[in-house]
Image (cartoon, rainbow, N blue to C red):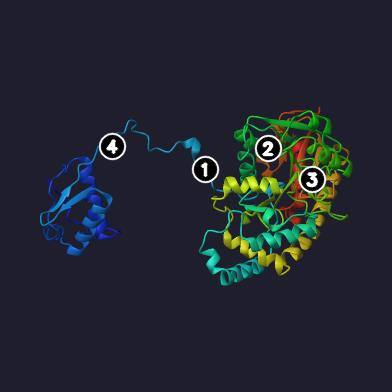
Amino acid sequence: MFFLKSDITGNDIHIYQQICIGIKEQILSGALLPNEKLPSKRKLADMLKVSVNSVTNAYEQLLAEGYIYSLERKGYYVENITKLVKKNKNINIFPKDLKEDFRKEDGWLSLSHMTSDISVFPFNEWMKCQRIAIHNHQNDLAEIVHPQGPYLVRKTLSRLIALSRGVICEPEQIVFGDSTQTLIRNLISMQEGNPIVAVEDPGYSRLYTMLKIITSNVLTIELDDKGIDIEKVESSGAKFLFVTPSHQFPTGIIMPISRRIELLNWSIQTQNRYIVEDDYDSEFKYKTDNIPSLQSLDTNQRVIYIGTFSKTMFPGVRISYMVLPPKLLKEYRQQFSNLIQGSNSLGLFALHYFIEQGYYDRHVKRMNLLYEMKRDLIIKELYLRFGDDIQIKDVSAGLHFLARFKTIKTYEEIKAMAIQRKLEIYSMRRFMLKNKYHIKNKIELIVGFATIDEKDIVDAVERLYQIIKGF
């Protein structure tokens, strides 16, 4: 039997929506039976004291969703809807362990290696470049761009990395992506079989975790004072070798020319062997000129160069890229010709103008000076406060450095104390992949200095001292 409350207008939502909700509830509860005829539009409007238009809109919506059907010249009827089986009465209660706490407490300071300082980023110039991109590329923005990214932007980037990093490539070799992880996932997933992949240890834990999902043959190779151990590389049987030669992550080691040449020679000993060079923060070099990329030395097309704008600009820009040797480029196009480009097209075109008009170069130079100042200041304060109880691997590059502290505390105790003191820090334990080494009465931290404000450095060092040496 049809029944709907008559005070239907006393609600914030539209009248026709209230009618829909009421009829749906009756159908799903069984109050309205399959094939039962509904009141005519005029009759229901009179019953509810609403307009015929409101009832018409409600019936049309119910028809569209499949709750009712109509017969010409006869009216509207209830559909025969299969009853939804619900086994668990509490299934719609969201698990507490999956809830996210989005609130950020005040008073935290960060020595994170993962962030960049956006306080002086030229957002006005960036937005100007976005407006130019919108004006000049409306047709491009209305279409799906090339799977590798717009050719114009790839051409601009090829010139930039040739000048800044010595990378030798054609625009066609560049592939844009929304992250380094996405690009690497595509690269490895297009390989046949289960290729052996080798990574540095300690190294980038996110990359290691992702690679293990893609392929079961992931090896970790320890470091020596020149970077990744060449003897262990040669005996690994790896097809892909991931390295960070310009500023090893996380130790900061800059790979010397002798080791670079050894790796390049290793890459040509067999067919289809490649080095993946992750050049994640090489734009920042202090006191000396930038170190040329490993790819710039490669005369045999065996280095895959990977870069990102997350460090030089800001992480939210979501623009990374890789430079593929021609042979791999051909395979990539065969596999991913229908791939939709992951980076935002507006962001890519804006990047083109940001680079072309000189904003990017000026910003990187400005940030080099700012980061060098922060780096020198925090190192000075650490030595002043810790004295002989600290050793710093003082490599003048990147946005972090490795510091070793004397302490009787464990990594777990340091982590717990850091939360209490509201100091964001990351220990070497996070980046020990398989080689879980331990130095007695010492712990190693990866100290980032990009986002810490100059005025907060003394406070951050004091908190760190209380965490490591306090009781």
Report the amino acid beneath label 1. Answer: Glu
Q: Which residue is mark 1?
A: 100
Alpha-carbon neighbours of circle 1 within 10 Å: few (<14), some, or many (≥20)?
A: few
Secondary structure, mark 2, is helix
Name the N-terminal-most of marks 2 and 4: 4
Q: Are marks 2 and 3 in contact (CB under 8 Å)?
A: no
3D distance between C-alphas at marks 2 and 3: 30 Å
Q: Position of residue 379 (x, y in %)?
A: 83, 48
Q: Identify the element where label 3 is drawn.
A: loop
Name the residue at 75% across, 28% down.
435
Disc 1 from disc 3: Cα separation: 49 Å
What's under tag 4, amino acid-wise? Leu
Q: Nearer the viewer, mark 3 or mark 4?
A: 3
Q: Which residue is mark 4?
A: 84
- Which residue is at a point 53% across and 44% down the rendered structure image? 101
Task: Tell me, yes or no, if residue 310 can be seen here.
Answer: no
Whole-number angstrom distance, CA of label 2 to CA of label 4: 44 Å
- The residue under the point 70% across, 36% down is 430
Give the CA distance from mark 4 to mark 1: 30 Å
The residue carrying mark 2 is 205
Of callouts 2 and 3, the N-terminal one: 2
Please provide percent x and percent y for residue 448. 74, 47
Element type where label 4 sits in the image = loop
* Proximity of marks 1 and 2: CB atoms separated by less than 8 Å: no
Secondary element type, mark 1 = loop
Return the x and y of residue 217 as percentages of the image width and height: 66, 30
| Amino acid found under the numbered disc labelled 2 | Ser
Query: Is residue 365 positioned above or below 398 on the image?
Result: below
